Image (cartoon, rainbow, N blue to C red):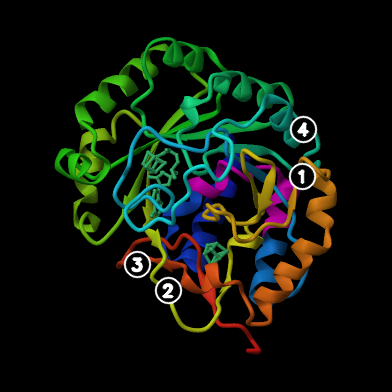
Amino acid sequence: MGFSDKVFKTLYRAGSRLLLGSGDNADWIHEKVQRPGNVLALARNMACYYLQLPLIPEIFNLTIEPVFGCNLRCRYCFCWGESAPELTGLRPDLMPWPLFRKAIDEAPNSLEAVTFVGMGEPLLHPRFSEMADYCADRGLRSIVYTNGTLLTGGVLERLAASRLSVLTVSVEADAEASREFRGVDNAVIRRNLERFIELKRPETEVKLSIVAHEKNADRFENARREWGALVTNVKANPRMGYEGSGSPPVCMEPWRGNVLVLTDGQVSPCCLDCKPDLVIGNLNEQSLGEILQGDAFHELIQRIISGNAPDRCVKCSEFSATGLPRKAPKRKPRRSG
Ligand SMILES: C[S@@+](CC[C@H](N)C(=O)[O-])C[C@H]1O[C@@H](n2cnc3c(N)ncnc32)[C@H](O)[C@@H]1O
Ligand code: SF4
Ligand code: SF4
């Protein structure tokens, strides 16, 4: 790690402690924001969130949904789990290649990373490793979240040979929780991951992400013991749900410097917007620049800061426990209306 990376990570650790309640999210922020100009822009975004200013945030990361649909049914999944809304058939299963290229080609100069996630399993996309290489050709880092079950055979070999920057495997705290909540055998995921690590390029980092919830929060150390030597980071990701109630929150999410592009081109400033309910445009009809500067984004931000956030946000809930970082902190609006 270079000197500037160490400085930024130290800064992010302090910022994460202050804004998210724990320093543990420093790595998560650093994988998306590394350019010095963007570090300042991120600080500006955060100041706008705190001061509740109706300014359109700067974008550093594009979240792409390459696949809408999944081979698993994790119990707590906000898109395919037990309490998720019915999503079947809402949009195409796969993001078409021309739409993917349009999103990347129209990205603003501030963009430095692309995260492949959304409401499905990215490795189901037949051209996924090409997507990672397309990002690398344009000087963008690529990050993927996967359940690890499809990391075998040709998919594994092509991805290991690609210029993917970060592979994040979503797992559970231990083998028992893995069977109970994700319906998978930890030993299989581990074998797949070990094979990927053998074959991958040295530059590709491997990390883990664990959803923290009521039933596993006390078992995180099991995961660190079991997987810690294989990966560079184990991220705790608080469970998000639909149990919220009360007054409309001002949520940090739209100021984080990230927008989500779904398989049908709809764009939302929230990574959890599975239906979606917070649409600010469609890439099949507008350029990304028009969407990011457009009235719909502005109006959404205005609604949020004036205490009139959409119902989706009012229902949004987040699991919290001592020492666990927040994912999407929320504040009360300055004025309610
Ligand atoms: C929706 S999944 C899509 C990518 C891939 N299928 C996977 O599981 O990694 C993206 C991430 O959200 C996490 N996740 C699922 N349900 C969640 C919830 N209710 N709250 C917070 N994160 C959740 C998953 O564990 C995964 O790390
Ligand atoms: S693997 Fe990912 S998308 Fe699929 S159900 Fe589990 S968390 Fe949801
Ligand atoms: S409140 Fe929930 S749904 Fe609304 S922007 Fe924040 S994270 Fe997204």
Judge the density around disc 2: few (<14), some (14-19), many (≥20) Cα neighbours within 10 Å: some
Q: Earlier in the sequence, mark 2 or mark 1?
A: 1
CB-based contact (under 8 Å), mark 2 and mark 1 = no
Per the model, the C-alpha gap separating discs 1 and 3 is 32 Å
Residue at 48% x, 64% y is 20
Helix, strand, or loop for circle 2?
A: loop
CB-based contact (under 8 Å), mark 3 and mark 4 = no
Per the model, the C-alpha gap separating discs 1 and 4 is 16 Å
Q: Type of residue at label 1?
A: Ser
Q: Which residues are magenta?
A: 27-42
Q: Type of residue at label 2?
A: Gly
Q: Earlier in the sequence, mark 1 or mark 3?
A: 1
Q: Quadrant of residue 127?
A: top right
CB-based contact (under 8 Å), mark 3 and mark 2 = no
Mark 1 against mark 3, which lies toward the viewer? 3
Which residue carries the number 2 mark?
Answer: 244
Asked if the beta carbon under badge 2 is closer than 8 A to the nearest atom of ligand 3, the reply is: yes
Which residue carries the number 3 mark?
Answer: 320
Q: Type of residue at label 4?
A: Lys
Q: Residue 208: give x, y in percent of width and height.
A: 37, 38
Residue 102, numbered circle: 4
